[in-house]
Amino acid sequence: MKTEIKSAQDSLDEFFLRIPSIDGVDPKIVAKISQLYSDKKLTDSNLTNALHELQMEEINGKNKTN
Amino acid sequence: MVKIKQIELHGFRGVLNDLTLDLNNRSALIYGDNASGKSSITDAVEWFLLDSVEHLPSAQETGSKQGQALRNVFLKETDSSSVKILFNTPILDSEKILSIIKNNVEAKQNNKTGEFKEYVASCERESLILRHKNLLDFISNSKKGKQDALFEILGYSGITKYYVILRKSLNATKKQAKNRGLDDLISTQKEKLITQLHTVIATEEQFLDTIRKLLTDIIFDESINSLDDISKLLPKLQKPANNDLVVEKILLTSLKDAMDSLIKRIPNINECYNTFRTAFAAFASEYEEVKQLLLGNLLENGLKVIDGEYKENTCPLCENDIDREQLIARLRDRIESLGTIRQKKKRYDDAKSDLSVSTTELLRLLTSELFKKDMNVELSQKVIAVATLYSATIKQMNTASAVELSADPLAAAVPELEVDSSKCIGLVAELNLRIELIDSLLASDKTSQIYIQIKLAFDAFTEMFKLQKERSQFERMVKTLKLITDEYKQMQKTIIQSFLDNFSDEIDGYYQFMNPDGKVGKIRLSTIENEDEELDGLRIDYDFLTLTSVSPPQSLLSESNLNCLGLAFFLTSVKSLNSKNAFIILDDVVSSFDTAHRIRFADLLIEQFGDYQLLVLTHEQIWYNHFSAIVKKKNWVVKTVKWTIEKGSFLTPSPEGLKQRIENKIVEHNEDNLGKDIREYVEMTGKSLAQGMEVRLPFRYNDTNEERMSYEILTGITSVINKQKLTPTGEFDAIERLIRSMSVGNKDSHDHLQKLTFDDTLALWKDVQDFEKLFYCISCKKAIAMKYYDQVGKIIRCECGSLFYNWKK
């Protein structure tokens, strides 16, 4: 019995929907990646910038509470 | 299932005015010479449905960013270009318009319904378009390239694209974390803490506990439960009497720590600079190779152009004649041969990047506020002087690392530079002496000593805490990206393997249909992985005559065989993935085929894809002639695309369409181009008739053959009629009248259009109609032709036999 073949788009949509449930991933980082993908903006430079922004938020944000 | 009723282009790609392809859900065969603009139709459908055109620049971006390339170059800025597609489901009909608004190209799809959005989204999931380029990549690439090309054919290219993005991001994050040197920076802060508090501090609680113990020495009644409490406490510990000494001690200690850090980093920056100089010198000594690398950019860009829109069989640089496919293959070879030089360039780039990171980090330290505080004492001025000297040297190194290789490396000198750490070491010794002296002066002031200890420890702890957070964030990023990339890798492999497992039989079936000679046994496909377990290529095995498991495919398969394989993949994906659309576009996909394969491919389409609406575009005239003869009987639309500078690309009208246009103009008394239309109609009808009657004309090569004028064709027909001695002779005077007509018979009139009066034009049209009556049957509407020749009665006739003439072969 043949299995149903998924198109590239279906496979990608499914993958980026599934990544938050991968064991051990950081939810905020995953949320950024998923957001970029759903906005059709997942490129090298956009991902680098998003990760940098997240890092700055993490470092500076938590410091303020101390 | 969705089929196309009509495609209408205006000012889009090669089309300047309008191009309307009326399909009414039927398949179409479209012929056009290279660069005639037939692919504008493919581009239009791709852009309309998928919002980008894969082979154009910035294909990864949205369609509007490709706007300039999509608009016809001769279109006025104020005019919009558009693509309108009507479907068999009218709710999906839409027009997509590209306009220039405030210097930006903006795209707007008119149909805003949910059904249309859903439909367009579903198109991204289907295999709809196959171009010659996809097949060529599949045929000519290495195993890795073959895999990428296969992904492209199957519509899976997006999968590779996102894997590359994720992997690049993972590697960049790892490198960034390493270059930041966070472990060393944290160690430095830890050492400072040990120096001040004489114990190892790992947690905030340990730090607060140690501070509380320190405060008991001076019996200070203050509860310390957080870092904020320490911030509030510090001003209360300051004593005005010794304040200058305290401030100096804190500054000098910070400077000493910074100097210690510098001493540790100086060997690294010197090493980075030397490595860069060596790499640079290696390039300078091999300048000829560097020049080849520069040429590499030209070759790569050239390949993009030639492998894209450029269709001529001449080299675009030297304009010498050369087969385009050969040129592409040669370019690929030359680009590949640059591999070794590229490796050297990579080493140079890495050294340059490492030096840049190191110099940036050190300059950040040396230009910090710490080195700007002039305490107006000799020692701090010495520190500032050393910092300024080091900054200057490091800036020189930084400038040297920014020298572009492309700007003749021999001309750009990279000086010998070194940061001399001895100055720093001597200064640290002086700082220590001064610090010891201040300590002795403050020996009796226990509170100030504790203030200094707490202040320096607090600064070190907060800095360490911040660096640790930065490090753990880097660790989280690397871990998350690694987990996602690994998962992605698995998904990628699963998809392709699943496709191969499920559809090997279909792929083999289509392949065998196109290759019935039986030389190639069952084709087996499997994926290849590299040492990182990444999908690294596609293995194609097959049996060949008595040989078993032959691989790679190109070892025994011809270019035509490989082309079959690529087509088999695409057609399989069409049947397996397409659930919404019943149309596919095959744009120039037989170019790498030999004649036998082209014929078998035509049979395959007719026999196994009869339910689909096929839009087949080709520039191969012989195949077009063969295929059009078959598909005309199947009620396909058969069209030719031409290009002129005035109109851009356009579909040549059918004789029926042209006749209708002429008659409409006559009714409307519209003289605009009427004479030209009639001449074109006579030429078209004459050619078709001459072909059907097998009128022999002098041999000419293809292009020249196409340019035969009415005069030559009509004279040829007359000659045959005279030879056959057809009766009644008088009726055939209509041909002579037509030939005599200045507007039609004179070859010059085609190029230098003579202005006719409306009455002249009506008389001309009457001659044309009389001419037609001689050869076209009023019942079946078909012309007499040798294919209906009656061997027994020796007559040439129309399809139904109502119109006939005695005819000797």
Image: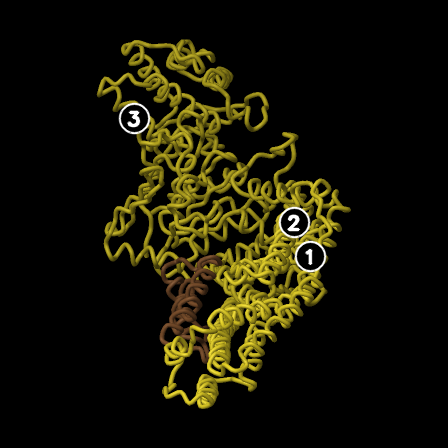
Chain colours: A brown, B yellow
Number of the front mark, 3 or 2: 2
Q: In which quarter of the image is the N terminus of chain B?
A: bottom left
Q: Do the residues labelled 1 and 2 touch (CB within 8 Å)?
A: yes
* Tag 2 secondary structure: helix
On screen, residue B82 above or below B739: below
Is B97 situated left or right of B798 in this image?
Answer: left
Q: Whole-percent x and y of residue B553?
A: 65, 59
Q: Whole-percent x and y of residue B7?
A: 34, 42
The amino acid type of the residue labelled 2 equals Ala
Number of the front mark, 1 or 3: 1
- Observer-nearest residue: A29 or B414? B414
**Which residue is painted at 47% across and 32% down in the image?**
B789
- Observer-nearest residue: B493 or B574? B493
What residue did someone put label 1 on?
B273
Q: Whole-percent x and y of residue B371?
A: 55, 60
Q: Given the image, what chain letter belongs to the residue carrying mark 1?
A: B
Neighbour tally class for label 3: few under 14, some 14-19, many 20 plus, Cα within 10 Å: some
Name the quadrant containing residue B752.
top left
User: Residues under labels 1 and 3: Cα distance?
Assistant: 77 Å
Neighbour tally class for label 1: few under 14, some 14-19, many 20 plus, Cα within 10 Å: many
What residue did someone put label 2 on?
B400
Tell me which label, 1 or 2, sits earlier in the chain.
1
Name the quadrant containing residue B642.
top left
Q: Are marks 1 and 3 in contact (CB under 8 Å)?
A: no
Tell me which label, 3 or 2, sits earlier in the chain.
2
* Tag 1 secondary structure: helix
- Observer-nearest residue: B661 or B226? B226
Tell me which label, 1 or 3, sits earlier in the chain.
1
* Tag 3 secondary structure: helix
What residue did someone put label 3 on?
B661
Q: Which residue lies furthest to the right in this view?
A: B285
